[in-house]
Image (cartoon, helix red, strand yellow):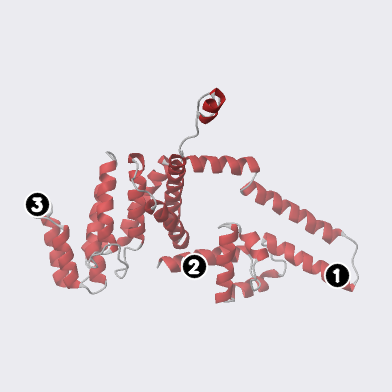
């Protein structure tokens, strides 16, 4: 009986494993913080596809939380805020049941919540709040929705004396039906995005201590991954190429095979051995829809930045790794627009 009691209590020390639900909650918290960090990074870099991917991850984690822990409220608010800001110019996108509420107007309450979570950065907070409010009106005007812009103005601004000057100016702008007046140009959408990027840079510095980020960093460093591995791979490939080139001149069949191997090695290193004419021809060649799909598939499999691997394993029409990188940047800009 004593042995049974000891066994049921979790061993000689009387300890027991923590409840699985609590363990999952802690792990989910780390994952959410990491997803938010990734969202911030890709938002700052302007890579819309990766931002959306991590935004979906963060949203799924948030939806699975029954109660937000106090220490993670800021993370949740920031995720929701960025998701809405990223869709700021798309009036066809709705986050609220009230279809009159644009993404920027939906983002404003989350910015208010973020302001309450901090007692510093007061100037930056004020700047971003002002820009959001002005751009809520401006985006409606840019789309020709002047009546809706006037309705937004009524919802946004109270009758307080502090709001009155700006409210009067915006009302005058709406009546002019000119979305390109100096006031709106001075408080542009691009300026809003720039200010938000400044804010998330500070947030990322604060969250560098996230457990998953630290653990992943140590793992990469201990395994010798990253730039060091790529450098070693380049050196090894270069050595192999030199060995092939210094061998005795082969007969015709061997010469063809060696030439093919050298071409593959050169592609892996992004070395173009056929001169400027071929390089120019490659640059002029338009990307096909199939190549875009191959590029996206390779990024999903190997990750952004592993252009050499993606090039070798993908079906591309005479491309180089630099071309893959440039095309990915172009696709990111297109999807963001």
Q: Position of residue 251 (x, y in %)?
A: 91, 70
Q: Is residue 289 above or below residue 193?
A: below
Q: On the image, numbered disc 3 is attached to which residue?
A: 160
Question: Residue 255 bears which disc, if any?
Answer: 1
At horizontal 43% and vertical 60% (from top left) the residue drawn is: 52
Q: Is residue 28 left or right of residue 125?
A: right
* Element class at badge 3: loop
Q: On the image, numbered disc 2 is attached to which residue?
A: 331
Question: Quarter-wise, where is residue 252 in the image?
Answer: bottom right
Give the mark, 1 or 3, whose residue is nearer the N terminus. 3
Are dots 1 and 2 in contact, CB under 8 Å?
Answer: no
**Quadrant holding the N terminus:** top right
User: From where the camera sits, is residue 94 visible?
Assistant: yes
Give the camera-side residue of 90 and 250: 90
Are dots 3 and 2 in contact, CB under 8 Å?
Answer: no
Query: Dot 1, how many residues are within 10 Å of its Cα: few (below 14), some (14-19), or many (20+)?
Result: few
Distance from disc 1 to disc 2, alpha carbons, whole Å, reads 39 Å
How many discs mark residues in the rendered view? 3
């Amino acid at each position: 009986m004593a042995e049974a009691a000891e066994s049921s209590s979790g061993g000689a020390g009387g300890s027991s494993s923590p409840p699985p639900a609590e363990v999952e909650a802690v792990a989910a918290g780390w994952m959410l913080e990491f997803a938010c960090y990734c969202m911030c990074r890709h938002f700052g870099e302007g890579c819309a596809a990766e931002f959306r991917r991590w935004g979906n991850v963060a949203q799924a984690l948030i939806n699975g939380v029954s109660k937000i822990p106090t220490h993670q409220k800021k993370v949740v608010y920031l995720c929701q805020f960025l998701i809405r800001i990223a869709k700021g110019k798309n009036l066809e996108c709705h986050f609220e049941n009230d279809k009159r509420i644009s993404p920027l107007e939906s983002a404003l309450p989350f910015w208010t919540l973020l302001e309450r979570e901090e007692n510093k950065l007061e100037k930056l907070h004020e700047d971003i709040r002002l820009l959001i409010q002005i751009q809520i009106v401006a985006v409606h005007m840019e789309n020709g929705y002047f009546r809706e812009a006037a309705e937004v103005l009524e919802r946004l601004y109270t009758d307080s004396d502090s709001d009155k000057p700006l409210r009067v100016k915006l009302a005058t702008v709406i009546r002019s039906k000119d979305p390109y007046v100096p006031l709106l140009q001075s408080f542009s959408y691009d300026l809003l995005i720039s200010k938000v990027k400044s804010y998330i840079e500070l947030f990322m510095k604060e969250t560098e201590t996230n457990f998953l980020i630290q653990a992943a960093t140590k793992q990469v460093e201990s395994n010798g991954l990253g730039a060091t591995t790529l450098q070693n791979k380049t050196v090894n490939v270069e050595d192999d190429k030199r060995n092939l080139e210094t061998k005795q001149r082969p007969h015709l069949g061997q010469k063809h095979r060696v030439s093919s191997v050298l071409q593959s090695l050169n592609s892996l290193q992004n070395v173009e051995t056929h001169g400027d004419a071929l390089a120019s021809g490659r640059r002029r060649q338009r990307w096909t829809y199939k190549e875009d799909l191959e590029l996206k598939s390779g990024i999903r499999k190997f990750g952004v930045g592993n252009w050499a691997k993606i090039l070798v394993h993908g079906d591309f029409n005479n491309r180089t790794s630099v071309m893959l990188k440039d095309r990915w940047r172009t696709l990111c800009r297109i999807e963001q627009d």
